[in-house]
Amino acid sequence: MFSAPLSTLATSVNHSAEAEANIRRQRKETYTEPLRPKGKKFSKEEMEDFKEFMMNFYKTIYKRRDECSQLCAEYPDTIGKYCKELVPKQISYEEFWQRYFYRCDVDNINNEWNRRTLEETSELEQQLVSSVTDSVQGVTNFIKSAVGGLQEDADTNKMAASSKEAEIEENKADAPIKQDAALERTKTVSEEEILFSSPGEKDAHSTSVGSNEEKFHDPLFSGISLKKTAANSEVSLRRSRKATYLEPIQRDDKLYTNEQLTEMNEFVIHFHETFQTRSEEFHLILQKHPRTVGHFYGELVPDHMTPDEFWLRYFYRCDADRIALEWERQQTARKEQLLAHKDQLNQSLRKSVSGATQLFKSALTFGGSQKKDDTTNGKQPPQND
């Protein structure tokens, strides 16, 4: 959707769409950059989503003036600031809100990320499938050529043998003399020389069944500064949600890995060991964030939970380093999924090449047995005069 650096951020860190919306909201290019920059190509899916958005936007924008005013009041340092600065001196009222809603809507951001993930996976699949197809086609062509050569040699042998028999029948009187002379001049061509008339054919076979693995390119970028910015934005969002303090850190409806459970237990133990010594830290946080942490503390403690429950959930969910680690795990899991998919396609390639190799061996066996049958039936191989 954005050129740079916004699109880079969207693919580099797997953070929540709300955190991404908060980051975009703070950037001036969110409002100044056109939705369709010159020279940029859009996929069919992007164009369909864009057209649908524009139709709905112009149907509702003039009914949403109160919503737009509330957004300016809620975010005076970002939306409110840029609206006063840009409208109507640089851009129109419609352009400003068109760009904001298109780029900062959570559903639109999720759709953008999902579409990009599908494009990356599809591109990887196409590369690997192309490698499989080229390899199998090369082996198949080589086998066809080899089988055709064997059949041509067999037909030539039969014709030469028939011609030789007719000549012997026609010249019975001097047949022994002619056979002795012919045997002296004949050089038997080995079976391998008939099959591989040139060394290049052998090289073509070994090359066609060789490894076709493409170097895997990691599409994910892990910029430290971007992660830090995104993690801090996520902390701000979580701090303002009531669910941050209400939900237990270990939910019954969610599955956890052994690593996650171990880390969770270690955090709880360390928290309770240091809880009594952190009262001053708690007091500073309540003073620094009166509209979020302070508000929920006054509302929930002690009627709905104890102070240690409140702070346990706050520090577990609102620590920027912990959030960055959580995203790192998600990023690693996504890489592992892509690599597993790549391995599956490589296994399919190996099976295809193995089947083609078996077919090639069968062709060689057929050629050898055909020559053996001709010799057993009393037919002589072709002789060179």
Image: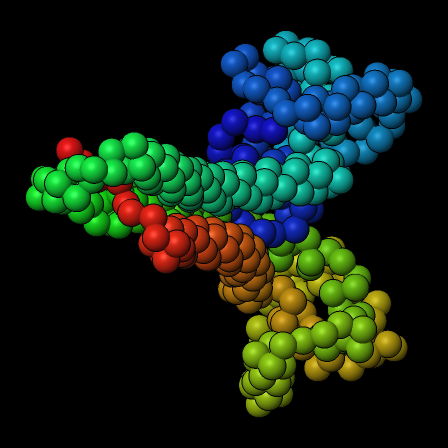
Colour scheme used in the picture? rainbow
Which quadrant does the N terminus fall into?
top right
Q: Is residue 118 left or right of residue 300?
A: left
What x and y, as percent, mark residue 35?
64, 20
Give whichever of 238, 54 is nearer the camera.
Answer: 54
Q: Which of the two residues, 244 or 383, is positioned nearer the viewer here?
A: 383
Q: Image height check: is 265 above or below 367?
A: below
Residue for point 70% across, 28% down: 45
What count of labels does the image hold? 0
Asked whether, in this view, residue 196 is left or right of residue 260, the answer is left
Decide: is 293 above or below 130.
below
Say which quadrant the C terminus sits in: top left
Which residue is at the front of the view, 162 or 136? 162
Q: Quadrant of residue 40?
A: top right
Give the vertical position of 356 relative to 149 (above or below).
below
The residue depicted at 60 percent of the width and 81 percent of the height is 258
Q: Position of residue 91 (x, y in %)?
A: 65, 12
Q: Would residue 288 be seen by someone viewing this image from the given angle?
A: yes
Q: Residue at x 59, y 40 (%)?
A: 122
Is 300 displayed left or right of 122 in the figure? Answer: right
Identify which residue, 325 or 70, lies in the foreground. Answer: 325
Q: Which quadrant would residue 202 be assigned to in this image?
A: top left
Picture quarter containing residue 100?
top right
Q: Where is residue 83? Give x, y as percent.
A: 68, 22
